[in-house]
Image: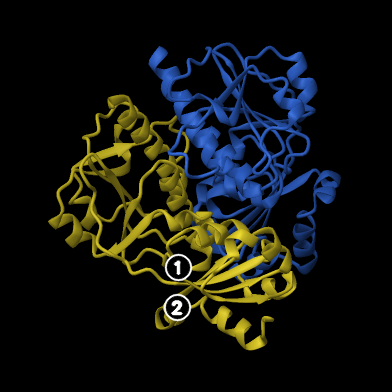
Chain colours: A blue, B yellow
Amino acid sequence: MMLTKARTRFIKSLKLKKIRIQEELFVIEGAKNVIELLKSNFLLHSLYSTTTFLDKNRVLVKNLNAQIFTATETQLADAGSFRTNNSVIALAKISESKPLSAGKDEFALILDDIHDPGNFGTIIRICDWYGISKVIASTDCVDLYNPKVIAATMGSFTRVHIYYTNLKEFMENEKGPFYGTYLEGESIHTIRFKSRGYIVVGNESTGISVEISALTDYRITIPGDGRMESLNAGIATAVLLDNLYRIQRRKN
Amino acid sequence: MMLTKARTRFIKSLKLKKIRIQEELFVIEGAKNVIELLKSNFLLHSLYSTTTFLDKNRVLVKNLNAQIFTATETQLADAGSFRTNNSVIALAKISESKPLSAGKDEFALILDDIHDPGNFGTIIRICDWYGISKVIASTDCVDLYNPKVIAATMGSFTRVHIYYTNLKEFMENEKGPFYGTYLEGESIHTIRFKSRGYIVVGNESTGISVEISALTDYRITIPGDGRMESLNAGIATAVLLDNLYRIQRRKN
């Protein structure tokens, strides 16, 4: 089938969180992301693709339990959120946000009020790199199913689980320790992390909120030369998780 | 004086590299970046600002050897490259790209073909965080004076020096060692870095070019869980420089 105008409007409407919740669907764009989606357990709803993409990925798209529509790159650019990366768009069923907690000998990430979709998606991608598969996000974080978040994850949204919840309640009821990241604290180069726990990353400009700070057990920081005021939240998370990974590996 | 339409056109024209070279001027936008500029050795050409910004930064703007124009946020948004962050725009004289090399007990960064302005600017910001003040960039890297690069540096362009050159010739004539970053190589968690040298970071999608790879001495890599194919160039640089910083500090 060909992509119709009504379908294009429907895909576009899913840019709004309200419509996504109502339809229980989200949009995945670009070859890399869609290929990861097709390999995952997410339920595919429909696929909109150039014939070139379908030819290239014949094995993957064979026996898909979903409607497949062919479209030109121009049509896909129109339906999607990005000017480039338009060989394919998929719609998939939103996966429910289920309670998560760090297991034995496991670290999970806590995100307090991360607004920027690019940062949020990048953080998920970094978690995937370092084998962190659980992220607990405050309800005021950007929506995982925002097309810009999904794009920035580069497919990692299929492997990293996100649980949106009231952080204060979560931390009050959950066993820590909670390592909060600040501009001052113990250096992540020398700290001895416990074998399990949570790393808390705060908002891009205001850091971890006062309420959440009160519930953290350790204040940790990224050492530097002291001329810059801060690092971007995505960058800071990468450096943190790299140190955690290095230290945990050395122990085992 | 008030910002005129002709001035606005002039500021806009500096988005083009050709015009920047001809006029030897570049554009700096936003309070954070402009304040860093005013504190630096860059030669200010002119300042376009809201009266609020001028009032707040009275000490900094006093005795400036440049023309000051007042404007509204809407006018500044129109003249600048960004929809937000519009309290001030400055024009400053382009600083010549001068030859650099790593000194004794010093590391410098080499960038091979970094195209994305956001990545390039972020990398400069990260260098500043870790006290790396010299970056050698291939001539096909994005221009430092691109407004998006300058914005992403968050003021670090005033402290980190960038030298654009033919990388092959530079590396042939310069004493190494050159540590090239790849998807496979020795882990940066365990490598013993020499006391001086260069870290080479390659293009966002294609990595370090074949020609430059032939001139690197060590292949280094960022260990991870192996499910993701790559990290963004900015993220990778942050993790690399963090490890270098940690290891060098431990030695001293």
Q: Estimate how packed mark 1 is, as few (under 14), some (14 to 19) or many (20 or more) residues with alpha carbons within 10 Å.
A: many
Neighbor class of circle 2 (other Cα within 10 Å; few <14, some 14-19, many 20+) is some
User: Which of the two labelled residues, at mark 2 and mark 1, occupies the earlier sequence position?
Assistant: 2
| Residue B249 position in % (x across, y down) | 33, 29
Could you say which quadrant of the image residue B160 lies in? bottom left
Horizontal side of residue A95 vs B24, given as left or right: right
Residue nearer the viewer, B123 or B202: B123
Residue, x 58% and y 39% (percent of image)? A123
Residue in front for this viewpoint, A38 or A188: A188
Please tell me which residue is depicted at 32% across the width and 29% down the height of the picture: B247
Question: Which residue does the numbered mark 2 point to in the structure image?
Answer: B20
Q: Secondary structure at mark 2?
A: helix
Q: Looking at the image, do the residues carrying marks 2 and 1 touch, with CB atoms under 8 Å apart?
A: yes
Residue at label 1?
B145
Label 2 chain ID? B
**Residue at (29%, 48%) from the top-left corner?**
B108
